[in-house]
Amino acid sequence: MGSESFDAIVVGTGQSGPPLAVRMAKEGMRVAVIERQRFGGTCVNYGCIPTKTLVASARAAHMARRAGDFGVKIAGEVAVDMRKVHDRMRDVAGTAEKSVEKYMRETKGIEVILGHASFLGPRKLSVQGASGQRELEAPKVFINVGARPSLPDVSGLGGLGGADPVPFLTNRGMLDLTELPRHLVILGGSYIGLEFGQMFRRFGSQVTVVEQSPRFLAREDDDVGQEIRRILEGEGIAFHVGDAPRLAERGGNDVSLTLASGERLVGSHLLVATGRRPNTDDLGLDKAGVRTDQRGFIEIDDQLRTSAEGVWALGDCNGKGAFTHTSYNDYEIAAANLFDHDPSLGPRRVSDRLPIYALFIDPPLGRVGLNEAQVRARGKPALVGKMPTARIGRARERSETDGFFKVHIDAETKQILGAAFLGIEGDETVQLLAPTMMAKAPYTLVTHTVLIHPTVSELVPTLMEDFLKPLQ
């Protein structure tokens, strides 16, 4: 079988592969785009778009139950039709998936190939699809294959240690539910687990979250984690923190988890949300000379280049970010370094990226830069400002006063080091700080800026004017 030659090959259609393929095609390159399953990757099909659509439905139910707080009367009990919730979610996500595929197929210079790709050698791949096998080669190959849920080593889970495997769901399976779980037990108290936990509690399920780490939300500051737990417990979610699962069992239509403490939890459904692993197992990376770390993530340099000449890794599979926005930034880095040569700026680099993300519970947590432990580890004088969300007019107007906004500032340079905004619109508001931080400008750039009243953002200058004190 002879190999077909392209100028570039893109494996996977997550958030970085498609725009990069289009950019290369517009630069006159002939590009092959390989997709084995669904266009758009995790974000479009199993992550951001479908889950945030569910979050919107859950919030609607939550606010309907609170209608009386606002002087609005609703006759009868608020009920959730999970079939309609599911259909709405699928409609929104399906439209996005079709849009990505259409985008690829209608771009001149791109050939879309459906099938599973694996390396035969350096920059040479085999694609096995429904119509047979093809061999492709190109001087440039970009891997954008994403990640999938990982499973913990718990006896009985997934067939481990038992002949009768316990049924469980991952974030993907949760999106197929059209009936409300009576009692959802969630193994894993991080971002995916908490988001699903709150939304299904608001739909009407009993929810229990098991987190084996002794520290809840270990990436975040202690006060942030404690406040999030308080908020979610206030909605009726039960937590078991610092208690590892030891045994999963099936009992009729129920599943159970026995914890290290000896406590046994019984639920109708089990969600496993204990982390992600890259989709690199079956790519034949060794044949291409592409190195991975112990967890399977592809090793890259600061410009996304792998250990193999002419091969780049973008998105979740390179371990440098598990977010849609970091994956898209990988595209921007790759495209700029390929085509936008500006001697005054130099190459774009992964290490220039400012850490920024959100936890999309309600109210959301917006995070940027360093957390408090990282600020302390610098060993330099710092300032901290912490303001309750209740100080914000919009929060009081909407009766959504849970949480607080917190910022850390270098005491000498006056530069913003990091912030955690847990509260109404915290995910949007925290981004106000990002340009100032990227510019390494003093925080006074923000405090001297006039912002619109009445908004959440207008209180950010107040946070840094009235609440700053030395970090002890």
Image (cartoon, rainbow, N blue to C red):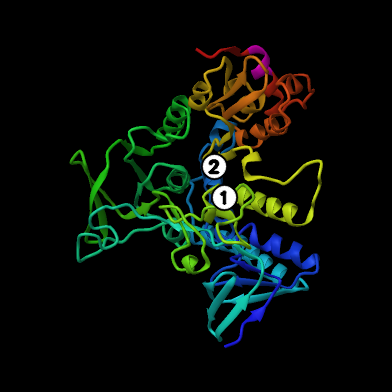
In the displayed structure image, the side of residue 430 where residue 84 appears, left or right: left
In the displayed structure image, the side of residue 467 where residue 298 appears, left or right: left
Is 465 colored magenta in this rendering? yes
Magenta stretch prevailing secondary structure: helix
- Give me the residue at 64% from left, 51% from top: 330
Where residue 7 appears, x then y in whole percent? 71, 71
Disc 1 marks which residue?
Answer: 52
Q: Is residue 262 above or below residue 37?
A: above
Disc 2 marks which residue?
Answer: 360
Rendered image quadrant of residue 93? bottom right
In the displayed structure image, the side of residue 451 where residue 77 appears, left or right: left
Q: Which region of the structure is painted magenta? A: 462-466
Asked whether the residues under the numbered discs 2 and 1 touch, taking CB atoms below 8 Å apart as contact, a structural biologist would say yes
Q: Is residue 77 visible?
A: no
Rendered image quadrant of residue 437? top right
C-alpha gap between disc 2 and disc 1: 8 Å
Where residue 420 appears, x then y in whole percent? 56, 29
Element under disc 2: loop
The amino acid at mark 2 is Phe
